[in-house]
Image (cartoon, grey):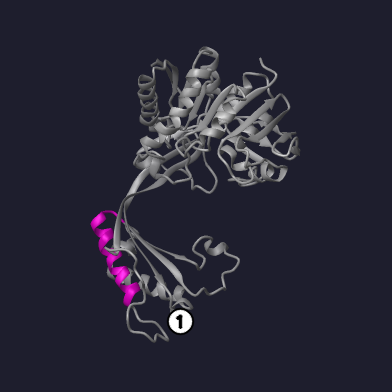
Amino acid sequence: MKEEIRILTPNGILGYGIPEEDFWRGVERQPDAMIVDGGSTDPGPYLLGLPKTIVSRDAYLRDLTLMLNACATRKIPVYISSAGGAGIREQVDMMVELIEQIAKRDGYHFKIAKIYSDIDPELVRQGLAQGKIAPCGSAPALQEEDIDQSARIVAQIGAEPFIKVLREHPDVDIIVSGRAYDPAPFAALCAMHGIEPGIYWHMGKIVECGANCAEPKGKVILATVRRDSFDLEPMSLKERCTPASVAAHTLYEKARPDLLTGPGGTIDLREATYEPISDRAVRVSGSRFIEAPAYTVKLEGAGIVGMRTIFIGGIRDPILIGQIDDYLCRVKAEAFKTYPELRSGQAQLIFHVYGMNGVMGEFEPLADVVPHEIGLLGEVTAPTQELANTICNSVRIDVLHMPYEGQVATAGNFAIPLNPPENPIGPVCKFTVYHVMEIESADALFPFEIVEI
C-alpha cells in the first residue's frame, strides 16, 4: 500500500474536451491513475431509452487519444465509468472498440477489464415481489408495468466490482465500466491503499466533475489522497481551488449538503474542513463514512412513451404578456376540446414561457415581474409523430391568432424564427425505473471480462 495516491481527472465527462497543456502538466505529476466519468442522467432518460451516446464518436476518439498516449508511454492506468453515457453493454463494448481502433493505429497494447451493469428485468421483478425496492428521491412506487415499459435497465456499480478487478488483475491497464456511481472508481483505487472511506468518497464526489470546483470552473484536476485528507489542485494555471469553491461544489446536485447516500452507506460531511495549502490548492479532512445495514444499488430504467413535436417563438406585446397565463390556459382549453387524446392523457401539451418563470416555474421569487418580451416553447407528446404534428400545428395557430382582451393589433401575436414552424423531435423517453434495490452481494450483479488488444 502507498501512503499517498494521486489521481488525475482530465474532465468531468469523457468527450467534453481535454486541454492538452493542462493534461500533460498533470501527467508530469506522475498520477497513479487517470479516472474519468463517461456518463450521467443529467441529459435525461433518452441516453438509456433510445439508446444514444452523450457525445459523438469523434469526441471520444479525441479525448481517448490523449489519455491512451499517457497510458501507453507513462504506464498510467485509465478507468472510465458509465461508458457512453448510459453505461449499457453495447456502450461499454463500443468504448473498447474505440480504444482498440486507437491502439491499432498507434501501436499500443492494453489489457482491459470490461465491467457490465445491465440488469435482467426478471431480477427487478423478484426484488419488487420481495419488497427490496424503494423509490429514489421523488420517484413514485415501482409498478410491474414500469418494468415492462423499460427498454433497458442498469444498476449503478459501487466500488466493489472495481476492487475485485484490481485485486484479481493488478496489471490491468484500462477499466471500462457500465453505469456506475460517479465516485466509485476513485473510491476503489483508494480503498486498495487503506485510505479512510469518508475521505475517498468525498474526494470522488468532487473530482468526478473535473475541475468544476475551481475558480473559474475548469476541466483538469489533480487529487492527492492520504489516509485522513485529500488535496485538490486544478492543472490550469489560470484556475485555483479555494475553501469556498471546494465547499460550494460539495453542495452540487445534493438533496442535502451534509449527508450523501450512495452504494453501501452515507458520506457524513458534518465535520469536514477545508483549508488552503497554497494560493491554488485546498486540503479537505474530517469526512466520515457511515456504513448502511443493508447494501443497496440505484436502478435506472427508461422507455419510449411517445413522439414529440415542438414550436418556438417570441411575444413582445405588453398587453398579451400581462395576461399570458390566462391566454395559454384558453389555448389549452381549445386544444382539449378538439383532441380527445389530450383529454384522455394519451397526448400531452406543455408550454414553457421563457423570460417569465420559464426556468424556475413556481419556485421563481420574482414571479410578479412583467418583462417586455417572452420566449414561448410549446411541446406536444403523442402516441404517433403524425398526431403530435397535428396537435402542435393546431396549438401553434391558436397561439398565433387567438384574440385576447385589450388587443390593439389584429396581426399575429407570435414571432416565429423557424420554418417550418413545427419541428418533429422524435421519440420521447421517461425514466420508468428510478429506484434503489437491496442486494445480497455488492459485486454479484456486475460481471467483468478481460480482453487484450
* Label 1, residues with CA under 10 Å away: few <14, some 14-19, many ≥20: some
Q: Residue at x 51, y 13 (%)?
A: 171
Image point (49%, 67%), residue name = 355
Residue 164, above or below 319:
above
Q: Main secondary structure of the magenta part?
A: helix
Q: Is residue 391 magenta?
A: yes
> Is residue 425 or residue 235 the one in the foreground?
235
Question: Which quarter of the picture shows residue 147?
Answer: top left
Work out which quarter of the rendered image holds the N terminus and state it.
top right
Q: How many marks?
A: 1
Please, what secondary structure does the residue beneath circle 1 have?
Answer: helix
**Viewer-side residue, 217 vs 140:** 217
Looking at the picture, tell me which residue is in the foreground, 223 or 370. Answer: 223
* 195 is higher (above) or lower (below) than 83: above
- The quadrant of the image that shows the C terminus is top left
Left or right side of 74 for 15 = left
Q: Badge 1 is on which residue?
A: 319
| 395 magenta-colored | yes
Q: Which residues are magenta?
A: 382-401
Seen in the picture, residue 113 relative to 259 is either above or below; the reply is above
Give the residue at the far left of this rendering.
Answer: 386
Residues 174 and 400: in front is 174
Horizontal side, residue 441 vs residue 117: left or right: right
Amino acid under disc 1: Ile
Q: Say which residue appears at 40% left-offset and 16% top-offset.
A: 451
Can you see residue 379? yes
Point out residue 58 in the picture as x, y percentages from the top left corner. 37, 36
**Rendering coords of residue 51 (x, y %):** 35, 39
Q: Where's residue 264, x and y in %?
A: 60, 30
In percent of width and height, residue 313 lies at: 38, 67
Q: Is residue 295 visible?
A: no
